[in-house]
Image (cartoon, grey):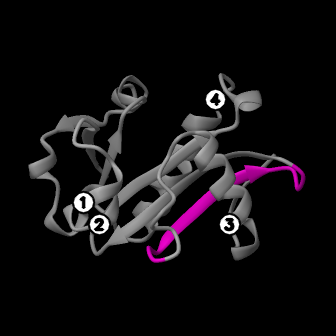
Amino acid sequence: MPLRPATDDDLPRITALLRQSALPVDDLADATVHFLLEDDDTELAGVIGLQRFDGVALLRSLAVAPAHRRGGLGGRLVAALEARARDLGITELVLLTQTAEAFFLRDDYQRIRRDDAPAAVQASAEFRTLCPASAVCMAKRLP
Protein backbone atom coordinates (compact mmCIF):
# COMPACT_ATOMS: atom_id res chain seq x y z
CA MET A 1 0.00 0.00 0.00
CA PRO A 2 1.50 3.37 -0.97
CA LEU A 3 1.51 6.43 1.26
CA ARG A 4 -0.68 9.30 0.10
CA PRO A 5 -1.92 12.69 1.29
CA ALA A 6 -5.24 12.51 3.09
CA THR A 7 -8.37 14.11 1.70
CA ASP A 8 -11.35 15.54 3.59
CA ASP A 9 -13.15 12.24 2.97
CA ASP A 10 -10.47 10.45 5.01
CA LEU A 11 -11.01 12.52 8.17
CA PRO A 12 -13.64 10.23 9.79
CA ARG A 13 -11.33 7.19 9.46
CA ILE A 14 -8.33 9.22 10.65
CA THR A 15 -10.27 10.47 13.66
CA ALA A 16 -11.39 6.92 14.51
CA LEU A 17 -7.82 5.57 14.37
CA LEU A 18 -6.50 8.45 16.46
CA ARG A 19 -9.20 7.88 19.09
CA GLN A 20 -8.43 4.14 19.09
CA SER A 21 -4.77 5.08 19.69
CA ALA A 22 -5.68 7.51 22.52
CA LEU A 23 -4.39 10.53 20.56
CA PRO A 24 -5.98 14.00 20.63
CA VAL A 25 -8.64 14.85 18.06
CA ASP A 26 -10.49 17.74 19.70
CA ASP A 27 -8.73 20.45 17.69
CA LEU A 28 -8.79 18.80 14.25
CA ALA A 29 -11.76 20.87 13.11
CA ASP A 30 -9.88 24.09 13.91
CA ALA A 31 -6.21 23.23 13.35
CA THR A 32 -4.71 22.94 9.90
CA VAL A 33 -3.13 19.50 10.02
CA HIS A 34 -1.85 17.91 6.84
CA PHE A 35 -2.08 14.14 7.06
CA LEU A 36 -0.26 11.40 5.21
CA LEU A 37 -1.72 7.92 5.37
CA GLU A 38 -1.51 4.40 4.13
CA ASP A 39 -4.69 2.51 3.32
CA ASP A 40 -6.16 -0.01 0.94
CA ASP A 41 -9.50 1.78 0.44
CA THR A 42 -11.12 -0.44 3.07
CA GLU A 43 -8.77 -0.16 6.04
CA LEU A 44 -6.64 2.69 7.32
CA ALA A 45 -3.27 1.14 8.18
CA GLY A 46 -1.53 4.24 9.50
CA VAL A 47 -1.50 8.02 9.62
CA ILE A 48 0.75 10.92 10.59
CA GLY A 49 0.09 14.66 10.71
CA LEU A 50 2.04 17.86 10.17
CA GLN A 51 0.85 21.12 11.70
CA ARG A 52 2.92 23.96 10.27
CA PHE A 53 4.04 27.13 12.03
CA ASP A 54 6.28 29.01 9.55
CA GLY A 55 9.73 27.32 9.57
CA VAL A 56 8.85 24.85 12.29
CA ALA A 57 6.13 22.22 12.51
CA LEU A 58 4.45 19.96 15.00
CA LEU A 59 4.69 16.28 14.13
CA ARG A 60 1.49 14.83 15.51
CA SER A 61 -1.01 12.06 15.27
CA LEU A 62 1.31 9.18 14.38
CA ALA A 63 -0.89 6.09 14.66
CA VAL A 64 -0.64 2.61 13.18
CA ALA A 65 -3.58 0.21 13.30
CA PRO A 66 -2.86 -2.84 15.50
CA ALA A 67 -2.90 -5.26 12.57
CA HIS A 68 -0.17 -3.26 10.81
CA ARG A 69 2.27 -2.73 13.70
CA ARG A 70 5.81 -4.10 13.79
CA GLY A 71 6.17 -3.96 10.01
CA GLY A 72 8.01 -0.65 9.64
CA LEU A 73 4.98 1.46 8.73
CA GLY A 74 5.60 3.95 11.56
CA GLY A 75 9.13 4.57 10.30
CA ARG A 76 7.93 4.99 6.71
CA LEU A 77 5.29 7.49 7.83
CA VAL A 78 7.87 9.53 9.78
CA ALA A 79 10.35 9.48 6.87
CA ALA A 80 7.67 10.62 4.42
CA LEU A 81 6.54 13.40 6.75
CA GLU A 82 10.14 14.58 7.22
CA ALA A 83 10.64 14.65 3.44
CA ARG A 84 7.43 16.65 3.01
CA ALA A 85 8.51 19.05 5.75
CA ARG A 86 11.87 19.63 4.03
CA ASP A 87 10.05 20.33 0.74
CA LEU A 88 8.00 22.97 2.57
CA GLY A 89 11.11 24.65 3.98
CA ILE A 90 10.53 23.46 7.53
CA THR A 91 13.78 23.31 9.49
CA GLU A 92 12.60 21.77 12.75
CA LEU A 93 9.99 19.25 13.84
CA VAL A 94 8.65 19.19 17.40
CA LEU A 95 6.43 16.55 18.98
CA LEU A 96 4.85 15.50 22.24
CA THR A 97 4.58 11.84 23.17
CA GLN A 98 3.50 9.75 26.10
CA THR A 99 4.33 6.37 24.60
CA ALA A 100 6.83 6.63 21.73
CA GLU A 101 9.94 8.31 23.13
CA ALA A 102 12.19 5.32 22.39
CA PHE A 103 10.82 5.10 18.82
CA PHE A 104 11.66 8.74 18.11
CA LEU A 105 15.06 8.59 19.84
CA ARG A 106 16.05 5.91 17.31
CA ASP A 107 15.25 8.40 14.56
CA ASP A 108 17.49 11.18 15.95
CA TYR A 109 14.82 13.14 17.79
CA GLN A 110 16.14 14.68 20.99
CA ARG A 111 14.30 15.24 24.22
CA ILE A 112 13.89 18.96 24.97
CA ARG A 113 12.23 20.93 27.71
CA ARG A 114 8.67 21.81 26.76
CA ASP A 115 9.49 25.47 27.47
CA ASP A 116 12.28 25.32 24.86
CA ALA A 117 9.89 24.50 22.00
CA PRO A 118 9.32 27.40 19.60
CA ALA A 119 6.69 29.86 20.85
CA ALA A 120 4.38 29.27 17.87
CA VAL A 121 4.28 25.54 18.61
CA GLN A 122 3.72 26.19 22.31
CA ALA A 123 0.66 28.25 21.36
CA SER A 124 -1.00 25.27 19.64
CA ALA A 125 -3.93 23.53 21.31
CA GLU A 126 -1.88 20.34 21.40
CA PHE A 127 0.68 22.05 23.67
CA ARG A 128 -1.71 24.26 25.64
CA THR A 129 -4.51 21.86 26.52
CA LEU A 130 -4.62 18.54 24.67
CA CYS A 131 -1.40 16.82 25.73
CA PRO A 132 -0.73 16.49 29.44
CA ALA A 133 2.27 18.14 31.08
CA SER A 134 3.71 14.64 31.57
CA ALA A 135 4.13 14.19 27.78
CA VAL A 136 7.75 14.14 26.62
CA CYS A 137 8.69 16.97 24.26
CA MET A 138 11.11 16.10 21.46
CA ALA A 139 12.60 17.92 18.48
CA LYS A 140 14.65 17.25 15.39
CA ARG A 141 16.47 19.72 13.17
CA LEU A 142 16.00 18.88 9.49
CA PRO A 143 19.04 19.16 7.23
Q: Are marks 1 and 4 in contact (CB under 8 Å)?
A: no
Q: How far is mark 3 from mark 1, CA to CA?
A: 23 Å
Disc 1 target residue: 128
- The residues tagged by marks 3 and 4 sit, at their Cα atoms, a distance apart of 23 Å
Q: CA distance from mark 2 to mark 3?
A: 20 Å
The answer to the question of whether label 1 and label 2 lie on touching residues, with beta carbons closer than 8 A, is yes
**Left or right, residue 105 beside residue 42:** left
**Residue 40 part of the magenta segment:** yes
Amino acid at circle 2: Ser
Quarter of the figure with residue 132: top left
| Magenta segment | 30-42
Q: Is residue 31 magenta?
A: yes
Helix, strand or loop status at disc 4: loop
Label 4 belongs to which residue?
A: 72
Q: Secondary structure at mark 1?
A: helix
Judged left or right of residue 8, residue 113 is left
Looking at the image, is mark 2 or mark 3 earlier in the sequence?
3
**Residue at the disc numbered 2:** 124
Q: Nearer the viewer, mark 1 or mark 4?
A: 1
Inspect the image, locate mark 3, and give the three-letter code of the amino acid beneath it: Leu
Residue type of the residue flagged with mark 4: Gly
Q: Give residue 117's position: percent from left, percent from top.
A: 16, 54
Residue at image position (39%, 32%) is 104
The reply to whether discs 2 and 3 touch (Cβ–Cβ < 8 Å) is no
Question: Which residue appears at 53% of the width and 68% of the height?
Answer: 34
Q: CA distance from mark 1 to mark 4?
A: 31 Å
Could you tell me the amino acid type at mark 1? Arg
Q: Which residue is mark 3?
A: 11
